[in-house]
Image (cartoon, rainbow, N blue to C red):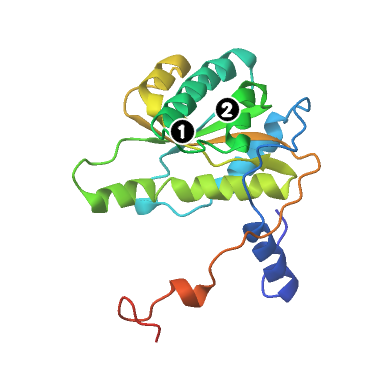
Amino acid sequence: MDAIDDASPAFAQAVEWALATTRSVRRHLDWERPVPREVIEACIDVAVQAPTGAHQEAWRFLVLDEPEPKARLAELYRRAMEGYAALRPGSDGPKPTARGLADRLAEMPALILVCSEGEPVQGSNAMHVAFYGSVLPAAWSLMVALRARGLGSTWTTLHLVHEEEAARALGIPDGVTQTVLLPVGYMSGARLRPAERRPAHEVTYWNTWGSRG
């Protein structure tokens, strides 16, 4: 990777635009176009530059790009979606785009499951934060790297309702924790823009909780 002038305004704008426009893409994908393995690995090379506690580098990436394993995970995902809808009777349930993702998950060109070797220490919030804080930044960096290459992805954890079944179906050994699933495909007509969010001054306190400074 060639060095660039990371002090320039253009660099800052490019980085901020990539961060602000990395959105979940469930539609407007090219379902037929394969995602080359070398492209996915290039994105993972970026992802593993993310911060990790105590230099553990315990992240592992399971990429599904063949029909059979994708179908196995997609079935568990659909079951989880149905269970989620059943827990919220009277509501509108999952959004149509979320249901659409569940219906077509097996058709995704690739599914990337971000895992971590080891398990969080039970009963310790500090250790939970340290554990997941050492893998989730890599998942986010991966999502941004995919976006930079014209690939859409979706941050989802719904399959974890059936985590043990997923582990058996995919040959994931004991002692490996599954986290985020990223369905991946080349974008086709997706227009990504910053989402409407509350501004910093409404969600930021200074020195004491609740103080606007």
Viewed as shown, does residue 81 lie left or right of 37? left
Image check: 147 left or right of 169? right
Furthest toward the bottom, the residue is: 213
Image position of 134 with respect to 212: above or below: above
Q: How far, Cα to Cα, is label 1 from label 2?
A: 10 Å
| Circle 2 SS class | helix
The residue sitting at 54% across, 49% down in the picture is 140
Q: Is residue 111 above or below residue 70?
A: below
Q: What residue type is labelled 1?
A: Leu
Image coords of residue 194 (percent x, y): 66, 60
User: Relative to the observer, which residue lies in front, 9 or 211?
Assistant: 211
Residue 32 screen position, x and y as percent: 78, 25
Give the residue drawn at x 54%, y 72%: 199
Q: Which residue is drawn at 40% across and 16% down?
A: 168
Q: Choose the circle earlier in sequence order: 1 or 2.
A: 2
Residue identifier under label 2: 102
**Residue placed most toward the observer, 167 or 161:** 161
Residue 162: % across, % down:
39, 24
Residue 113 image point, x, y percent = 51, 32
In this view, the residue in front, 190 or 121, is: 190
The label on residue 158 is 1
Name which residue lies at 71% across and 50% down. Answer: 148
Which kind of residue does numbered mark 2 sit on?
Answer: Ala
